[in-house]
Image (tube, rainbow, N blue to C red):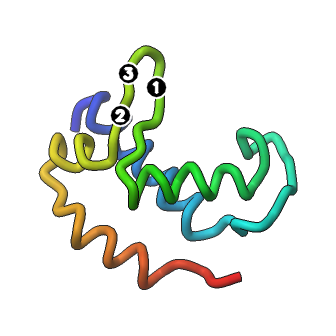
Amino acid sequence: MTPETDLILAIIRQAIRDYIRLDPDSDKVSAEFHIDEGHDFQTAESFLFNDAPIQFGKLNLTFTDLCRTLGIDQRRLKHRIARTVIEY
């Protein structure tokens, strides 16, 4: 793997972790979360399921673009994510 591939995978993994583990109704703030837990959940959800771009430096990255770059079937991955999500 290349450093670029590692970076793309890290972005996808973090979005998945935020979507699966965070409480969408929480306003808890900590050093791990950008603004608050609920905001990070919403950002991850928008990125994963609404193809909203996230900004990385001067780049605007979408889940579709990152999956395409890595050759990942995004529909299959979204299905796996949906089966794993924690309901609050």
Which residue is tagged 3?
A: 59
Residue type marked 2: Leu
Q: Residue furthest top?
A: 58
Residue placed at 13% from the left, 51% from the top? 71
Within 10 Å of the Cα at label 2, are there few (<14), some (14-19), or many (20+) other Cα atoms? some
Task: Examine the image and state in which quarter residue 72 appears.
Answer: bottom left
Q: How many angstroms separate mark 1 from mark 2 (CA)?
A: 7 Å
| Tags 1 and 2 touching, CB below 8 Å | yes
Q: Which mark is residue 56?
A: 1
In this view, 61 is above or below 51: above
Q: Secondary structure at mark 3?
A: strand
Residue placed at 55% from the left, 63% from the top? 19
Residue placed at 61% from the left, 81% from the top? 86
Looking at the picture, how far across and down is residue 28, in whole percent? 86, 56
Q: Secondary structure at mark 2?
A: strand
Residue type marked 1: Phe
Task: Examine the image and state in which quarter residue 80 appears.
Answer: bottom left
Residue 1 left/right relative to 36: left
From the viewer's side, name the closer residue of 3 and 32: 32
Q: Quadrant of the C terminus?
A: bottom right
